[in-house]
Amino acid sequence: VAIGRPVWNTQTHVLDRYLRPVPPGVPGELYLGGVQLARGYLNRPGLTAERFVAHENGRLYRTGDLVRWREDGVLEYLGRTDDQVKIRGFRVELGEIETALTTLPGVTSAAVVARPEQQQLVGYVVGDVRDARRALAKSLPEHMVPSVIVELDALPLTQSGKLDRKALPEPTVTVTDAEPSTEWEHALARLFADLLELDRVGVHDDFFALGGHSLLATKLVGRVRAELGIELAIGTVFDAPTVARLAAVLDDGAHKRPALTPMPRPRRIPLSFAQQRLWFLYRLEGATPTYNVSLAVRIDGPLDVEALQAALSDVVGRHEVLRTVYPEFEGRPYQQVLDRTPALRFGGTPEEAARRAFELDREPPFEARLLDGQVLSLLTHHIATDGWSGERLLADLSTAYAARMHGRRPDWSPLPVQYADYALWQRDLLGNDADPESLSAIQLAYWREQLAELPEELRLPADRPRPAVPSFEGDAVRFRLSSETRAALATLARDTGSTVFMTVQAALAALLDQLGAGPDIPLGTPVAGRTDDALDGLVGFFVNTLVLRTDVSGDPTFRQLVERVRRTDLDAFAHQDLPFERLVEAVNPGRAMGRHPLFQVMLAYQQAPAAPAPFGAASLREEHVDFYAARMDLSCHLFEGVDGIDGWLVYSKDLFDRSMMDDLVGRFVRLVESMAGAPDRPLSVTTVLTDAERAVTFPAHPVPPTTLTELIEAQVARTPEVTAVVFEGESLTYAELDARASALASQLAAAGVGPDRIVGIRQDRSLDLVISLVAVLKAGGAYLPLDPSYPAERLDLMIEDARPMVVLPCALDGEADVRKPTPDNAAYVIYTSGSTGRPKGVVITHRAIVNRLLWMQHEYQLTQQDVVLQKTPSSFDVSVWEFFWPLITGAKLVLARPGGHKDPDYLAGLMGQVTTVHFVPSMLRAYGDRPLPKRVITSGEALSADIARPGMHNLYGPTEAAVDVTHWTVTDEVAIGRPVWNTQTHVLDRYLRPVPPGVPGELYLGGVQLARGYLDRPGLTAERFVAGPDGERLYRTGDLVRRHNGVLHYLGRTDDQVKIRGFRVELGE
């Protein structure tokens, strides 16, 4: 819809999200400028600041309208920016679809809404909807065609005449009464209804007319394969979109999955896809025990060793995979089945046996060892077995042993196929990725869409950084969910049509979210992979790994989260044929040797194993093997029994300490019990904290109700003749400084300066600068540093924004009595970078900076013998303590020459005169190994371990909290430490819940050092200074930290703000 050209004296800017102009034809948001802009919203400063923004082209109004320029200079209206949605991974502009709908014959007006839960669009039209979807498909891509189009007499409007989207009715799907009659129709009708979330469908109802789309069609193909054993091409669903027509396709029988039978074997048998990955890792890492699968059983009763040896030969002879080696030819591995069977070995411990490394290209991947005469270790490389094979191996061994005890061979039925047959069948079944109708291509399409924009790494609260090369050393923590908890989970599973596994998966995702992993949680889970009956009795590596992506966003209840998990899992299980190895190749995530691809946490859930069969005259019981290979960060193994769920958590010792894992398991058990008992509570009201962790307090410290001015004057009275400040060979005593500052203060008072009045100081570092600073405070005012080295344009912007009464130096006449400030009056205003392109002035009170300076004196104890170097530009808040800490303690202040703070050699020449100096870490690095005084304080940037020296004092804090709020004396650890006096440091998640120790969260600050806010920026003040969980005022720093043993560690930013040479920089500005 064309909306034309601008009227007189009005600027129309079409900008992207970075406020950059977009080219003609490209959609962007419309911003307006010029004389017609409103002053703002009456008594709504926050909303005014949000909608009227600063820009290089002046003050602009952000309309929220999506438009584009035509080539002829005319604007076209496309819709609202808040109408831009994501559907099935595609970014969709609803306005563009609405425009397309209104161009259809017979349609007078239209609206489109998104239903993200169903991943579908719903269209509403006034007019004729017949064939609307088919007509739209000719001009729009499939993902932009609404799944349902509803005909209305009129679109609902608000009182102002705008479309009322909230009043649009829920689409009602009309279902025919034609009931299914055949077995195929009943099965398909059930699948249609389940995927479309309908109670029932008729056999003549169109899948797409009922709300289906391409992703749901892909899921339907997977469900048909998984539940009916039928292979369908995705195109078949589009060609036969009703239950009746699709059932007729199934009736011809041509789509039955090919059965697994013995295959003609080539000379060199290829490996299965799963085996290929393990073989590649073997060639990369060499022979290691990392991928060993150990099974140890204690034989209680008499043992016939000769019969055992013969039985082992029988079992290895029965299962070719246990006597297969994997050499290579022209760089490609192949299977070579040997005739010989390994001999039974003797001696050692279960742990020693489990650490044996197999040379896969020259020796069979299986070893049996008898330990201490009664413990049998069956060790198999993962390339020849999986978790489901152990039970089959023991069953066959028991059968063979019983036969050999009686002097005969086992009389078992021959296996229908061997593993080599499976490897060949798997390749035929999957087909070629290049064929869009192949099973491989269909399932790849599903997984590519399902895993789009998957987090590259799941952030977990680790004790150590991830090593470049993992050791795979692991350990395990055991735990138990009670029978009552299991019963509650089973009830929830029954109510939601899910499984206990799905409820536990939801709980684990909720836990990881609370531990800082974020709301998008990918978990790996093993599936048996035995998709043909012929595989049931076979030993081998059939297991496949699925990536189950759990969305914890939006604060669902536990019940709602389980329902989300159910939908995701059913679709994933329906697409389980694609080998994980092929998926990794196709998705091609960011790879790193130290990180498992696509997911870093595994969840495995099984029924508790049945008791082993009798072993001749003896019995077997599983022996614990204390060897855990950590193939990923965390692996949670659960076994469900009638009296509860037993579990163990295997963890990487590269990343985690045992104490951290003990805590994690405890939190998991508490969280599962809490959510299972109250599944309808939102996740935001659940917590994994212990009572002690919730009761954390920050002790208060008494500070006198005084001002910075009074502290300086008190020091003048104590040491009037002591040298206060030195600059380039000139100096002032405390009395001289006070006299000159008092005279200037009297002149400032005559000019109207008093409490909460701002005075700009545009002076280079000098004695006069110090006199001006003290004078402004003595006059009761707040000083605004205006660094002369700043560009004139930026200084002018600061002056325009702050509107100081006076800018020093300037000519002043007259004298007047000064008006003393109170602790709650402003002491100074310092400007920081602003994300909107406009710097913002931070207003700090006397009470705040007095707390900061008195804490610093208590902590570091300056004396009259100390000398502090002042080298930080006055526009940076570190300068505040550099100027005033010595002046309230009787120490000497030495001023570096203007620009001297950038010259390491010049600074080194001053170090012999001073005892205390501050460095931004990047400047400390540039300073190198030149001499340093006894007291070095760092802040302004993250201090890295390579430049930190024991005894340095590392401080942290934003300008909005009176310079620094935490402190740490460097030892062998670098941190930002513990809070200063009367300061609260809260580490919170996105729901403003405290996070557990060790878990990353955003740092919120409370206490007396908080700034009053941003000067004349009530909207921004309200955005950054927020109400905490208990109603207290907190500053949201945007810094990501974690607390360990009461000590804070800085991790990074939650936004686009960075620190450059100690200065806070908004990239948006």
Image (cartoon, helix red, strand yellow):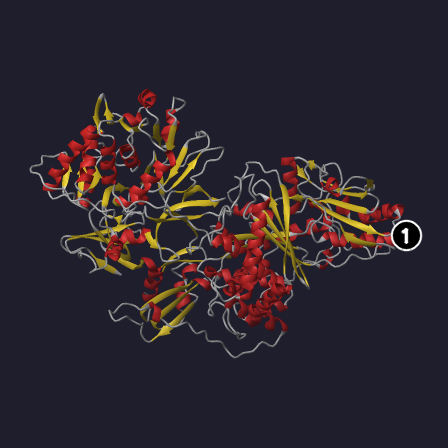
Whether residue 505 is visible here, answered yes or no, is: no
Note whether 824 is above or below 673 in the view shown. Answer: above
Residue 1027 location (% of width, % of height):
35, 56
Residue 188 drawn at (x, y percent): 58, 69
- The image quarter containing residue 203 is bottom right
Q: Residue 653: horizontal and vertical position, in percent?
A: 60, 41
Q: Residue at point 54% right, 58% down?
A: 671
In the displayed structure image, the side of residue 846 where residue 447 appears, left or right:
right
Residue 294 seen in this snapshot: yes
Q: Secondary structure at mark 1?
A: helix
Left or right of residue 574, residue 829 in this image: left
Residue farthest along the bottom direction in this orientation:
177
- Residue located farthest toward the front when viewing the structure as drawn: 718
Q: Three-letter amino acid code at disc 1?
A: Met
Vertical arrangement, residue 804 with respect to residue 50, above or below? above
Residue labelled with disc 1:
405
Q: Quadrant of the C terminus?
A: top left
| Quadrant showing the N terminus | bottom left
Viewer-nearest residue: 504 or 141 = 504
**Residue lying at the far left of the rendered structure:** 814
Q: Foreground: 573 or 636?
A: 636
Q: Residue at x 44, y 52 (%)?
A: 989
Q: Is residue 134 above or below residue 793?
A: below
Q: How many marks?
A: 1
Q: Picture coordinates of residue 715 (x, y %)?
A: 25, 34
Query: 10 Å neighbourhood of mark 1: few (<14), some, or many (≥20)?
Result: many
